[in-house]
Image (cartoon, rainbow, N blue to C red):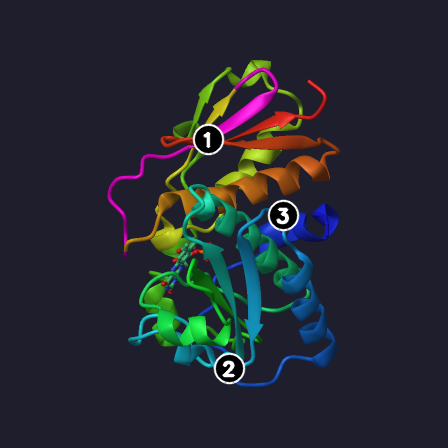
Amino acid sequence: MDINSSKWYPAIYTRRSRRSYRPDPIDPKLLNKMIKFCEHFRPFTNTRAVLILQQVDKAFRGIIGPSGAPAFIAFVGNVSDKHIQEKIGYMGEAIVLEATSLGLSTCWVGGFLRRNIIEEFVDADSREEVFGLTPIGYAKERTSVKESIMTGFGWTHRRRPLSKLVTGIAEEGWHEWTRSVLEAARLAPSATNRQPWKFHIGMDSITISTNETGHDFNLSKRLDCGIAMLHLEVAALNQGVHGIWELLETPEVARFTIDGM
Ligand SMILES: Cc1cc2nc3c(=O)[nH]c(=O)nc-3n(C[C@H](O)[C@H](O)[C@H](O)COP(=O)(O)O)c2cc1C
């Protein structure tokens, strides 16, 4: 199953984390599409996604986090894979953008997971762990007070400007598509909106890097960078630019090189 850039590129701009859901069941046609998508979208080895028809509230502890959705999708990976974090970010965000394009709401959740309960639902084997999840369903039309407080009244949707994120070749030397690709990567969601990425522009490549220090809620920044990788590639494909990923060692995460260079 391939990246559907014409559907997912607009979804990059419309997606927002939503945390208050109506309990309404998901339209069976959409539900079926999402179940199939989760089963078949496997861009990397050692990762999988499972849609679980249980209220999302059962999947984590505490009151911080999304509530009310009738289902959630768990992102599962093999812990012995040294690139598992970025692979999970990339796969999970494809699922988030597919759901967004179908009119469903989502929110990455990484903290306070009830891992034992979720791992039973997904029938995890001894090498697998749940790295995150998203509720799936219909967000309440009006943002609740709790949700407004949790998003800092919209603050968490703000992003740093590209000028603070980019190194390497100066803008005069960029391809005509480079700016839109970086813009899409910059809009990626990240845990606590920490935006831990840097983009190094080469002649025909973009390298994403991060420092792995200062984890929030014990969540790897490489996972956030995996989400940015997916946004970057969707935007590139939307401009007709194909590339290949090479996964790298910290502080680098991955390099996207235009195919055929
Ligand atoms: C890996 C990851 C983990 C996250 N964990 C949580 C969480 O535990 N609880 C929560 O309410 N939001 C969580 N979020 C959502 C972020 O807070 C949100 O994506 C960020 O503030 C940007 O806002 P936006 O998604 O509306 O653009 C997480 C996001 C990511 C990418």
- Nearest to N terminus: mark 2 or mark 1: 2
**Residue sitting at x 46%, y 81%:** 68
Q: Give the residue number, with chain letter if any, for mark 1.
A: 248
Kindly identify the amino acid type of the residue bearing the numbered disc 2. Gln
- Nearest to N terminus: mark 1 or mark 3: 3
Kindly identify the amino acid type of the residue bearing the numbered disc 1. Leu
- Nearest to N terminus: mark 3 or mark 2: 3
Region in magenta = 202-217
Quarter in which the C terminus is drawn = top right
Give whichever of 116, 133 is nearer the camera.
Answer: 116
**Residue sitting at x 72%, y 21%:** 260
Q: Position of residue 202 (x, y in %)?
A: 54, 18
Q: Give the residue number, with chain letter if any, for mark 2.
A: 54
The answer to whether residue 187 is seen in the rendering is no
Q: Give the residue number, with chain letter if any, for mark 3.
A: 43
**Residue sitting at x 63%, y 48%:** 43
Q: Quadrant of residue 39?
A: bottom right
Among all residues in the image, which is located at the extreme front?
Answer: 126
Position of 249 relative to 167 (above/below): below
* Secondary structure mostly taken by the magenta-highlighted segment of the chain: loop
Position of 73 relative to 232 (above/below): below
Q: Secondary structure at mark 3?
A: loop
Kindly identify the amino acid type of the residue bearing the numbered disc 3. Pro
Q: Position of residue 117 (x, y in %)?
A: 39, 76
Q: CA distance from mark 2 to mark 1?
A: 37 Å
**Residue sitting at x 31%, y 76%:** 63
Q: CA distance from mark 1 to mark 3?
A: 17 Å
Q: Position of residue 243 (x, y in %)?
A: 66, 30
